[in-house]
Image (cartoon, rainbow, N blue to C red):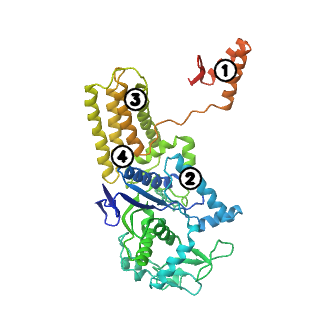
Amino acid sequence: MRIFNTLTRRKEEFIPIEEGKVRMYVCGPTVYNLIHVGNARPMIIFDTVRRYMEYKGYQVNYVSNFTDVDDKIIKKAIEEGVSADEISVRYIAECKKDMADMNVKPATTHPQATQEIEGMVDMIQSLIDKGYAYAAADGTVYFRVKAFKAYGKLSHKNLDDLQSGFRAIAVSGEEQKEDPLDFVLWKPKKEGEPSWPSPWCDGRPGWHIECSVMSRKYLGEEIDIHAGGEDLIFPHHENEIAQSEACNGKVFAHYWMHNAFLNIDNHKMSKSLGNFRTVREITAQYDPQVLRFFMLNAHYRSPLNFSAELMESAASSLERIRECARRLSDRKGSGEGSPISEAEEALLAEAKGFTAKFEEAMDDDFNTADALAAVFELVKFANSHVTEESSPAFAAALLSLLSTLTDVLGLILDKPEESLDKEIEELIAARQAARKAKDFAKADAIRDELLAKGIILKDTREGVKWQRA
Ligand code: AMP
Ligand code: ZN
């Protein structure tokens, strides 16, 4: 399995720290609003990476945080006149709902920054003790970037270039910093903001230290994969490396994976630009599996433009897979028929070639677009070789091949259960009552009324069955 590593800008063979195990950390969302489709991209992509690793037999320890203390959360709380806690609790619950809809597995651990403050204070203290950090007069603690010689190795920036790009301290109003490159580890509280005690001042942690601490606590000092959207490469991930490696004296993460942006009209979808669509809006319009398919149909390192056309095309492609699965399932359930024939055995061996193709694509830096192409080859193969004469066992074996692959991609093939409107349910019950009372004219009238609503009723020995017209 080869992974494109942002650190080396090359595809590298994946060698885990511990055989058969993967330690993986994915930076999660800041919870002050419903997540948008851009935020959904890393969730779906890295969930698929995890699923593929598990399919290959790895035991994956998958950690993804919620940033639940942040300026934006505080601002929202003030706007609504509620506590910051109320905001983050609400949007963590909403985010988990969206994740479940998109079939993103819950992480092994979903740590929350506010529950890990003690660990952050400890790490900041170690950094001060080792000379990598300093407290200013007002209690703000800064990381001393120049003390960490490898700074810039992930984003491939060199310190001199960075230095010239930064405004002078006097201009930026950060006179208490030793150097403009230094970043905040701990900041003093402002009135009305959530805060915690520390040796430096009552205050709260900077964003970057959260991930260094949570990653170490749940995965150890040295991990296999650290991931997130490409906007996090600098400064967030660069700063995480500086903090963790300076503190622990070990390589922080061996492989750094970054997804490209989800764009809209060729601009990054983001809350601050106001050009976002929430996952909730989209899943009201489409089956969430269509959104998942749409994401997987592009390479995760290529920018992806969100459009109604692409969503419609994702919907019809997914339907093709589902239709094939339904046909196979019907044939499998047909019960009668001869056992699998020799000719079918040969076809099955051929069909396994599509699994090999799928794996080859996924092994090549998780090329989900090519993996889906292999799935479609299997669909085409099944459509042309499974007929009314095929054995149920043959159909069953092909269905099993197909669903193994779609499971790896996290695509659910069953359509969401159709639910009858309350009104329709009541009409069916009223018709039953009319029939019981031998008022057949009324019963027929209700049947016609349902037909007008697109519901066909069938009276069978097992009772009333219905279907959409
Ligand atoms: P945030 O809540 O902004 O910290 O973002 C949470 C995760 O979503 C991070 O991994 C971001 O990199 C990612 N992300 C945010 N916007 C986009 C986008 N438009 N396309 C892809 N990933 C994004
Ligand atoms: Zn992070």
Badge 4 is on which residue? Answer: 369
Who's the residue at 65% across and 76% down the image? Answer: 190
Q: Amino acid at mark 1?
A: Glu
Assign a secondary structure to mark 1.
helix
Q: Earlier in the sequence, mark 4 or mark 1?
A: 4
Sequence-first disc among 1 and 2: 2
For numbered disc 4, what is the local secondary structure?
Answer: helix
| Quadrant location of the N terminus in the rendered image | bottom left
Give the spatial CA distance, label 1 vs label 3.
Answer: 35 Å
Are the residues at dot 1 and dot 3 in contact (C-beta closer than 8 Å)? Answer: no
What amino acid type is highlighted by mark number 3?
A: Leu
Asked whether mark 3 lies closer than 8 Å to ligand 1, one says no
- Using the numbered discs, state the Cα–Cα distance from disc 4 to disc 1 in whole angstroms: 46 Å
Q: Which residue is mark 3?
A: 328
User: What residue is disc 2 on?
Assistant: 96
The mark that comes first in sequence, 3 or 4, is 3
Q: Residue at x 45, y 63 (%)?
A: 231
Residue occupied by mark 1: 449
Q: CA distance from mark 1 to mark 2?
A: 40 Å
